Amino acid sequence: MKKLVIYLLLVVTLAVITTLALNTPVHGATQAKFNREVACMAHNIYFEAHNQDHKGRIAVGNVTQNRVKSSRFANSVCGVVYDKSKRLNGKPYCEFSWATIAKGRYCTSGGKKYNRKLYNDIKETATMLLTINHVDYTEGALFYHADYVNGGWFKKNVTKTVQIGTHIFYK
């Protein structure tokens, strides 16, 4: 009986610690800002990798996080995802293809529809990525493209790190 009580206390303690970790904003961010960062990460993973397995989805999130850490990109998830500082034929475009439609201040998903259950699963993955130190499956990659895309527009200046699912990652 004593072992059972100790086991139950351990389980409850782990559950409380996990709950606190998943609900604590990172780096002193306000809860509202943290929630926006989770939403931006979830949208990016959803539209870039909803057809990938869990590891492939995390890898797309890894690239977003690697960009946040890099001085070459914005210093927030939303800043990275919706950055429209690049120009193509004089018009702004976003780093991620799904967000290239420029509207107002931000690039948007252009009203794309999504599967709510799948999005909620991906939102949990995004929350985990932003609250827990997770392995970087991409080995520090800042870029990727689908394996069916040539990607020749930047291959000369980057080094391939890994392929996960249908995405090829580079740094």
Image: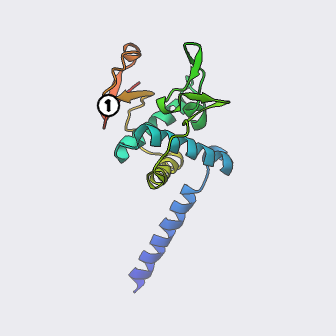
Q: Is residue 24 visible?
A: yes
Camera-side residue of 113 and 72: 113
The residue lying at 62 percent from left, 50 percent from top is 25
Q: Amino acid at mark 1?
A: Val
Picture coordinates of residue 169, whole percent (x, y): 37, 29
Q: How many marks?
A: 1
Q: Quadrant of the C terminus?
A: top left
Secondary structure under the numbered disc 1 in the rendered image: strand
Image-based side of 143 in relation to 28, left or right: left
Q: Is residue 76 visible?
A: no
The residue lying at 67 percent from left, 49 percent from top is 32
Q: Quadrant of residue 138?
A: top left
* Colouring mode (rainbow / by chain / secondary structure / one colour): rainbow
Image-based side of 79 in relation to 140, left or right: right
The residue lying at 58 percent from left, 32 percent from top is 82
| Residue that protrudes farthest toward the bottom in the picture | 1
Above or below residue 20? Residue 51 is: above
Above or below residue 126? Residue 83 is: above
- State the residue position of label 1: 162
Above or below residue 104? Residue 126 is: below
Picture coordinates of residue 41, whole percent (x, y): 52, 42
The residue lying at 66 percent from left, 45 percent from top is 33
Picture coordinates of residue 6, whole percent (x, y): 44, 77
Q: Quadrant of the N terminus?
A: bottom left
Picture coordinates of residue 102, whole percent (x, y): 60, 27
Q: Residues within 10 Å of mark 1 (few under 14, many from 20)?
A: some
Q: Quadrant of residue 136?
A: top left
Camera-side residue of 125 and 66: 125
Camera-side residue of 121 and 24: 121
